[in-house]
Image (tube, helix red, strand yellow):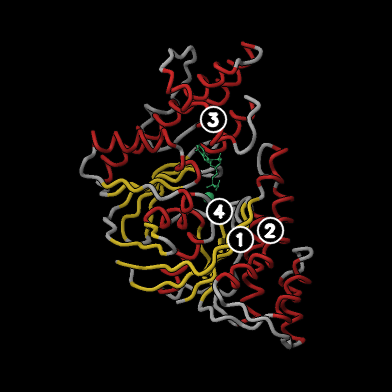
Amino acid sequence: MNILAIETSCDETAVALLEASGTDESATFKILGNALLSQIEIHKQYGGVFPALAKRAHAENLTPLLHAALKEAGMLTEAPQDISEETRAKVSEILAREPGLTDAFLLFLSTTKHADIDAIAVTHGPGLEPALWVGVNFARALSVAWDIPIVPINHMEGHFLASLASCQGDTLTVESVKLPVLGLLISGGHTELDLMKDWLSYELLGATRDDAVGEAFDKVARMMDLPYPGGPQISKLAERDRETQRENPFILPRPMLESNDYDFSFSGIKTSVLYKIKEKGTLTDIEKEQMAREFEDAVSEVLWKKASRALDESGAKMLIIGGGVAANKHIQRLFTDMIARDHPEVTLHIPSRDLTTDNALMIGLAGFYRARRKEFKKDVTANGNLHLA
Ligand code: KG4
Ligand code: ZN
């Protein structure tokens, strides 16, 4: 099954083509094309993602990315095409609220032959709603023009399933999954613990009540005048401090450790950093490294304690960590050590970096399982607050 996947939920525009085969128990995904444009440079100056600019950039990027992904896959045939008035009208209507996209897409259609695609998988939530709509409408327009069915995909399910995958060269494999699987999904937009009890059936155990982990990393980085995205910057400074084994003068809270649930809260840690910086005036380079380390320690400890308790109480046999923050070295180390010590019966799986951050591969992966179930939908809508269920 050839799947075209589209992801526009945040600040990455991504289009991928996957050739998927197999079953729920054992599936293989050959990456035929994988095109991605990050908007980091656009949002840098705002210290976070600016929705209106994200929407515009997605609209500009989608057609060239589709072209690039098809080309990489060897599935691009450029030749003049007749487009019926009816198709032209429908496409224009669907893309009416995405400025600039209609002309670019109609030009693409009039110069590109229909490619051999069985399903379009598109992220319909959660995320920034205006950004999601661009991807959804693009998928709808392509669906009408090339007569390909759409499977709407939950972005978090994409992270979850991608975290179960192993990558070898240009092939992803999902097999030997031991249910139930506990997923800790940590990114710039989300922090949640989900339990996959049966295949593709989830229970949300807990989530952040305020900032997402990645968002807290980004905000703390901004307080310390570090560039966006702040996660990797904080991590770099913290690693430097770890090498020195210095005493740390900063102590930050570990919020909600004792609360009898799986929810998180990170805004208190962030505010505490702000007060400490205000107290000091400015931080020296060494103090920045120490603060980064204490912040990383506090966050990791809370994440681990909650995940550990969820493992105890759910009887999960696997633990996966997905989302951009899963790339954090200290979190990876802590989880690896603690699983070996406290839960040796649990298999920990942390996907490679390419699979943890936002991309369209993960949407294609989820698309395969949903398309196998024929979960096709005509009137797909975007929902910024979509939950896993
Ligand atoms: O999953 P992702 O690419 O996008 C979404 O937010 O959905 O995650 C991006 C987030 C950013 O907040 C970034 O600062 C954080 O992941 N991040 C990290 C690291 N690498 C990326 N946070 C901590 N340590 C890292 N090494
Ligand atoms: Zn994400």
| Position of residue 349 measured from the top left corner of the image (x, y, whole percent) | 34, 48
The amino acid at mark 3 is Ile
Q: Are marks 2 and 3 in contact (CB under 8 Å)?
A: no
Above-or-below relation of 114 to 187: below
Earlier sequence position, callout 2 versus callout 3: 2
Based on the displayed image, in which of its 4 quarters is residue 377 positioned? Answer: bottom right
Residue 207 placement, left or right of 50: left
Earlier sequence position, callout 3 versus callout 1: 3
The amino acid at mark 2 is His
Local SS, label 1: loop
| Position of residue 351 measured from the top left corner of the image (x, y, whole percent) | 40, 50
Earlier sequence position, callout 1 versus callout 4: 4
Residue 201 or 34: which is nearer the viewer? 34
Q: Which residue is label 4 attached to? A: 126
- The residues tagged by marks 2 and 3 sit, at their Cα atoms, a distance apart of 28 Å
Q: Nearer the viewer, mark 2 or mark 3?
A: 3
The amino acid at mark 1 is Ala
Q: Which residue is label 3 attached to? A: 234
- The residues tagged by marks 3 and 4 sit, at their Cα atoms, a distance apart of 26 Å
* Ligand 2 contact, mark 4 (Cβ < 8 Å): no
Q: Which residue is label 2 attached to? A: 58
Q: Residues within 10 Å of mark 4 (few under 14, many from 20)?
A: many
Based on the displayed image, in which of its 4 quarters is residue 379 positioned? Answer: bottom right
Q: Which residue is label 1 attached to? A: 382
Q: Are marks 3 and 4 in contact (CB under 8 Å)?
A: no
Report the residue at 42% width, 31% height from top. 300
* Ligand 1 contact, mark 3 (Cβ < 8 Å): yes
- The residues tagged by marks 2 and 4 sit, at their Cα atoms, a distance apart of 16 Å
| Position of residue 293 measured from the top left corner of the image (x, y, whole percent) | 47, 24
